[in-house]
Image (cartoon, grey):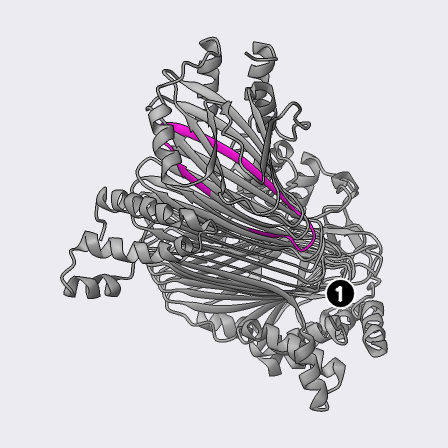
């Protein structure tokens, strides 16, 4: 199935980033290397698990035109107005070892174009699950045509509990005056490793709103790279990561303001309990000449366990003076007096914690840019919070 | 707009006020570095065998290390073979016993710099350990300090007089192989200051030292060690100016602070070294390792710095908060103009329980300067109740300058409360307009706004320094309008 020899593939795997790379300082991809090597050793054959039922369940939960990429293989939906799709026949030159791995092992690539204002969101279901350790790749290019107004929902899920590594690339272009809403839900199995690299390029007066919800996954790394090269862009993105025992979730974001005026704002929030580690690295670069830039970054974290670790790094690189940039980061715990207040109202400690953590996440949930998916996101967050809080070894 | 650009022009064209070279013969080692140079430096200072060995080990470690490249700085490669590693005023043999005996040319130099050595020193109540190039030439107020039991002397003197203290604490905060420049300093450090405050003593005056780099082609490798024993307090002032010259000079200093139980050290710096001219020619390369160790319970170390000079600055005064309830503080104003580059910030390592730290960093970038704040706040798994507040603000003046922040936060304990906020902006037209319509000239308005921007840091400076700092800031920035 592969176009390259085993040696070439192993050579690429050997070049995947390590913690010696500044950008990967806190996230160790050894597991991804290990899974890929085992898969290559076993002949690079993937025997898919029985995943149809799971696909039914997920695609039924949000009303969308679903494109399913199961273990890297694409299943196209029936035609829908305003949405045109084709398989990718070429991929641009890879800029990193992860992208090289993606190009080398890619089975099906997808290109979707959104014109006008489709009735339903475009759904992209990335689901992986095999009978044995396996690696899968996905690549999707999404184009919002000039003036289009559309929504995209990415859903990353797993079936079965075998070790799996999935490496996904998503490239989004938002045309002039287009209005794009983007939602990413990730609820993978703890034995799954995921790396996603999402690039967004915006046209003149384009609007891009996004939200990412990381609810599962053993080792997750999401890179979101946004480039603003035409004036008037309005960018806003949120992220919520809920990490419990054994999870490692890393969100790296980068916004390049190449021209102004333009606005970008991001808000990431995390709730950590049990032995887990989360990373947030937000970078805003205001290039020479990008006058009238307004960039804001916020990151807030709740640490609920002795063994949880958060590594946060809000970076600003600014090369011109007509800018307004700010960032704020906080790390803290639930407020004891608030907990006490709820206890006096008859709530037990776990329940009180749940109420407070819910409130912490509520702002992001209410801003989910794809309206038809807001309820399901709310339910998923609620359920995950319950899991996290109840696995508690109450430290206080 | 005309006045704006004229003002800006005036700022850019301002010459370095402290630019002059004192014409004194210096006895220097030829350029280059090998074990013999290390031995020669040690021999000249009549150092004991253990210190020579310590230096040699540092040198061997340095050979194996690589110059760091991660900083947001661009400068031509430093030719370590072209630097002379030792320069002392020639009159080393017959050191002056009092100020009268001091070479008048030296006194003149200090005079130009406004160092309160003579009468002014007495009036200001400041004891000065003036470091001219590499050897201390005069120390005042020694008697008064001796009465209190405070040891304040040059590093070479401390090695001879108090070897047990030096041996105990040297390299205990900044190990030899801590980083490339620390290893280099450990091998070839020339002189510096040593301070020991005994138990329960509140140092009766503010201690001060002026660093000067004078002889051409001489890298200066200062070493400062301050130990505050239990329950003591000291405030230490460091101020720097350097004469004008066209060749880049390397300065790699180490400052080690140790605070034992209930001790407090306040370390203030005004740094105004030659920043190079408007085209980025010349200027000091300033690669400094400063670290304070809050070793004892309830100890406190506070760094305050006003950085306006140097072509390249690489400096991260840090605190290791080991002791329970210990406190670390970092207050910084950094100004970069023309083609200056600064990569500066701090590290707060929370190790003990209930440790607290505060970081306030104000950066002002003008002309074609690039400035970065790089900070680390780390809360170790055992550091229950750690608290940090970080604020770093940047003010940009002009289209071609840059301001960057790279704050790292690594939090491994759930009871930590960590806050970080940063803003970057230019002087707002509204603020300027408001001042202007009240009849305040543009230049004064900018001064007011910039001073207001830095106020939080200035109020942490001792009085004498606050005045100097404001003057420096005005020199660097008045008239610059964003």
Q: Which residue occupies 68% across, 85% down?
A: B435
User: B116 or B180: nearer the eye?
Assistant: B180
Q: Is residue B373 visible?
A: no
Q: Which residue occupies 67% across, 74% down?
A: B428
Say whether residue B403 is magenta: no
Q: Which span of residues is magenta-colored?
A: A184-208
The answer to whether B133 appears left or right of B153 in the picture is right
Quarter occupied by the N terminus of chain B: bottom right
In the rendered image, residue B38, in percent from the top left (x then y), is placed at 66, 40
Name the subunit of mark 1: B
Label 1 sits on a secondary structure element that is: loop
In the rendered image, residue A351, in percent from the top left (x then y), is placed at 20, 54
User: B470 or B130: nearer the eye?
Assistant: B470
Q: Which residue occupies 61% across, 33% down?
A: B60
**Placement of A159 over or under B135, stated as above or below:** above
The answer to whether A114 appears left or right of B173 in the picture is right
């Amino acid at each position: 199935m592969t176009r390259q020899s085993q040696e070439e593939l192993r050579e690429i795997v050997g070049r995947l980033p390590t913690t010696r790379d500044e950008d990967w300082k806190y996230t160790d991809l050894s597991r991804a290397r290990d899974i890929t090597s085992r898969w290559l050793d076993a002949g690079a054959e993937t025997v898919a698990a029985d995943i149809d039922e799971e696909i039914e369940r997920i695609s039924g939960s949000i009303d969308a035109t679903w494109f399913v990429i199961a273990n890297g293989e694409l299943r196209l939906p029936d035609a829908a107005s305003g949405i045109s799709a084709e398989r990718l026949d070429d991929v641009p030159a890879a800029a990193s070892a992860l992208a090289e791995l993606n190009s080398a092992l890619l089975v099906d690539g997808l290109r979707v174009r959104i014109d006008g204002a489709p009735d339903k969101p475009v759904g992209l279901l990335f689901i992986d699950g095999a009978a044995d350790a396996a690696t899968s790749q996905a690549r999707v290019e999404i184009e919002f045509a000039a003036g289009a107004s559309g929504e995209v929902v990415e859903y990353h899920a797993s079936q079965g509990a075998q070790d799996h590594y999935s490496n996904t690339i998503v490239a989004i272009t938002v045309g002039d005056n287009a209005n794009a809403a983007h939602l990413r839900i990730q609820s993978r199995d703890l034995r799954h490793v995921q790396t996603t690299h999402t690039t967004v390029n915006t046209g003149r007066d384009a609007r891009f709103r996004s939200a990412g919800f990381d609810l599962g996954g053993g080792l997750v790394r999401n890179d979101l790279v946004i480039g603003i090269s035409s004036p008037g862009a309005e960018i806003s993105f949120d992220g919520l990561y809920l990490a419990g025992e054994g999870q490692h979730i890393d969100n790296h974001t980068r916004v390049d303001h190449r021209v102004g005026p333009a606005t970008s704002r991001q808000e990431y929030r995390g709730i950590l309990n049990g032995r887990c580690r989360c990373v947030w690295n937000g970078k805003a670069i205001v290039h020479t000449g990008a006058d009238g830039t307004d960039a804001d970054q916020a990151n807030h974290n709740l640490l609920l366990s002795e063994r949880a670790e958060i590594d946060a790094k809000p970076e600003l690189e600014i090369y011109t003076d007509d800018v307004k940039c700010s960032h704020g980061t906080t790390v803290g715990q639930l407020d004891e007096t608030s907990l006490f207040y709820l206890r006096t109202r008859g709530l037990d400690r776990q329940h009180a914690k749940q109420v407070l953590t819910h409130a912490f996440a509520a702002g992001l949930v209410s801003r989910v840019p794809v309206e038809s998916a807001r309820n399901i996101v709310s339910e998923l967050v609620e359920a995950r919070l319950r899991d996290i809080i109840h696995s508690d070894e109450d430290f206080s | 707009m005309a006045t704006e650009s004229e003002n800006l022009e005036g700022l850019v064209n301002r010459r370095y006020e402290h630019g002059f070279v004192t014409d004194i013969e210096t006895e220097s080692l030829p350029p280059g570095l090998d074990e013999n140079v290390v031995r020669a430096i040690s021999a000249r200072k009549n150092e004991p065998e253990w210190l020579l060995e310590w230096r040699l080990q540092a040198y061997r470690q340095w050979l194996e290390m690589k110059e760091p490249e991660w900083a947001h700085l661009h400068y031509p490669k430093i030719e370590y073979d072209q630097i002379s590693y030792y320069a002392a005023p020639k009159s080393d043999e017959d050191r002056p016993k009092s100020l009268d005996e001091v070479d008048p040319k030296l006194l003149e130099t200090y005079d130009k710099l406004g160092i309160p050595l003579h009468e002014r020193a007495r009036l200001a109540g400041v004891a000065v350990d003036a470091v001219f190039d590499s050897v201390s030439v005069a120390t005042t107020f020694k008697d008064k300090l001796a009465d209190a039991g405070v040891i304040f002397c040059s590093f070479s003197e401390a090695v001879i007089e108090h070897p047990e203290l030096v041996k105990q604490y040297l390299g205990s905060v900044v190990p030899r192989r801590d980083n490339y420049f620390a290893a280099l300093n450990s091998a070839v450090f020339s002189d510096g200051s040593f301070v020991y405050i005994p138990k329960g003593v509140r140092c009766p005056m503010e201690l001060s030292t002026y660093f000067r780099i004078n002889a051409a082609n001489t890298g200066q490798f200062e070493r400062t060690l301050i130990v505050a024993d239990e329950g003591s307090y000291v405030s230490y002032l460091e101020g720097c100016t350097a004469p004008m010259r066209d060749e880049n000079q390397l300065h790699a200093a180490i400052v080690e602070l140790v605070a034992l139980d209930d001790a407090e050290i306040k370390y203030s710096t005004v740094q105004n070294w030659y920043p190079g001219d408007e085209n980025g020619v010349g200027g000091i390369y300033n690669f400094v390792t400063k670290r304070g160790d809050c070793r004892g319970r309830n100890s406190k170390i506070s760094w305050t710095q006003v950085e306006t000079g140097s072509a390249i600055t690489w400096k991260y005064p840090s605190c290791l908060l080991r002791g329970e309830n210990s406190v670390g503080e970092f207050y910084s104003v950094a100004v970069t103009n023309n083609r200056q580059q600064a990569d500066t910030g701090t590290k707060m390592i929370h190790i003990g329980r209930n440790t607290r730290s505060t970081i306030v960093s104000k950066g002002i970038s003008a002309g074609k300067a690039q400035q970065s704040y790089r900070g680390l706040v780390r809360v170790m798994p055992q550091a229950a109740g750690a608290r940090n507040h970080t604020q770093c603000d940047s003010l940009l003046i002009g289209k071609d300058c840059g301001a960057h922040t790279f704050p790292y936060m690594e939090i491994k304990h759930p009871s930590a409360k960590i806050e970080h906020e940063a803003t970057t902006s230019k002087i707002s037209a509204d603020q300027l307009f408001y001042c202007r319509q009240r009849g305040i000239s543009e230049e004064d308005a900018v001064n007011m706004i910039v001073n207001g921007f830095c106020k939080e840091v200035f109020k942490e400076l001792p009085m004498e320094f606050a005045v100097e700092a404001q003057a420096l800031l005005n020199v660097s920035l008045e008239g610059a309008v964003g």
